[in-house]
Image (cartoon, grey):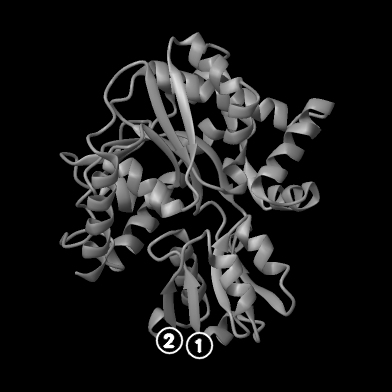
Amino acid sequence: MKRIIAVGMAVALALTLAGAPAAAGDTYKIAWSHYTGWEPWEYANEAGILEKWGQKFGIEIELTLINDYIESINLYTGGAFDGCTMTNMDALTLPAVGGVDSTALIIGDFSNGNDGIVMKNGNAVADLKGREVKLVELSVSHYLLARALEKNGLAERDLSVINTSDSDIAAVFAADPNGAVVTWNPPLMQCRNVKGAALVFDSSQIPGEIIDLMVVRSDAPDSLKKALVGAWYETMAVMSGKSKESKEAVAYMAQFAGGTEAEFRAQLRTTQMFYRPADAVALAKGAKIKQTMEYVRAFCFDHGLYGDADSKDFVGIQFPDGSIIGDRSNVKLRFDAAFMELAAEGKL
């Protein structure tokens, strides 16, 4: 009950702050938060790529950075935004469980070391026993911690979880002589650089389970979906190239993220980016994502993230082939490869 109250209060607050859901019209609002795999959205906005694709489809896209990750999703869930960057797990446990029918429009990457557990005065997951561990509660950091503990014969009852904003976590860790945190890049890199810090577990040990998405309301118009997909893959082409423009793009993202270019490139090496739309389509249409979401929804239900629901089937999750796991009459999370396929075929 504690968790559903926490989520319910967050959504209520978001509704209060946001007012009514965004009205249909020519302007659409997209939220994002700092993460290595999402920094390209800022470059797309700064370089005019987002504006160009919006104009192509007769709309305007307003991109807003929200410095607190969970707040960004709560605001999206509450109606302030038409789309938002989030992980597969958070798309399920916040908007979907909250009743917002959402579509995973773009699979940008999966974390391959970009999420991790860092601690002082310890060198292994076993050293977390009896400690306070700070993380964004109910996020993928919580999921990563649970998986790490499971793999090392421990459980959450063996330690204390302290909910901490991602915007504060690096500073809190640096100031704590006995700190232990779970976070993602760029704050993960900042924590790892603290004297005496040790990385004891990261997402490369559970590859393909933490997927980073651009999620939009399922009833958003095709014009918005096409514009976002087109802008994203144009940005991916720039970012992954060898030209001067590519180097300048990566340098800009690094600076905006608050780090050096070398640090940002190091973070990219632990991010399995899908620079080509065909690669993202392959993941979206493959068997692996179904296995992952089955694992994720079981974890979410077992950890109370479905609130008072009596089954993990409470929410339906639909895949590109039309198959559904969960309640077919309550589908609230949809993986859609159609627009990424258009990009792959050069048909946007």
Judged from the image, the secondary structure of the residue bearing numbered disc 2 is helix
Judged from the image, the secondary structure of the residue bearing numbered disc 1 is loop
**Measured from the top left, where is residue 78 in percent x and y?**
27, 43
Residue 295 quadrant:
bottom left
To which residue does mark 1 refer? 129
**Measured from the top left, where is residue 268 in percent x and y?**
69, 47
Question: Visible in this render: residue 344?
Answer: yes
Q: Does residue 268 lie above or below 41 as drawn?
A: below
Identify which residue, 56 or 214, lies in the foreground. 56
Q: Which corner quadrant holds the N terminus?
A: bottom left
Identify which residue, 220 or 42, lies in the foreground. 42
Question: Visible in this render: residue 243?
Answer: no
Q: Does residue 301 lie above or below 242 as drawn?
A: below
**Measured from the top left, where is residue 317 in percent x and y?**
30, 42
Identify which residue, 284 or 165, lies in the foreground. 165
**Distance of label 1 from label 2 (alpha carbons):** 5 Å
Q: Mark 2, residues whose alpha carbon is within 10 Å: few (<14), some, or many (≥20)? A: some
**Measured from the top left, where is residue 161 in percent x and y?**
42, 77
Instruction: Kindly indicate whether the residue at mark 2 contacts the one at mark 1 (C-beta within 8 angstroms).
Output: yes
Q: Is residue 217 left or right of residue 72?
A: left
To which residue does mark 2 refer? 158
Identify the residue at image location x=23%, y=58%.
Answer: 9
Q: Is residue 14 left or right of residue 108?
A: left
**Which amino acid type corresponds to the residue marked 2 in the rendered image?**
Asp
**Which amino acid type corresponds to the residue marked 1 in the rendered image?**
Lys
Residue 206: mark: none
Q: How many marks?
A: 2
Residue 296 quadrant:
bottom left
Sequence-wise first label, 1 or 2:
1
Identify the residue at image location x=57%, y=77%.
Answer: 180
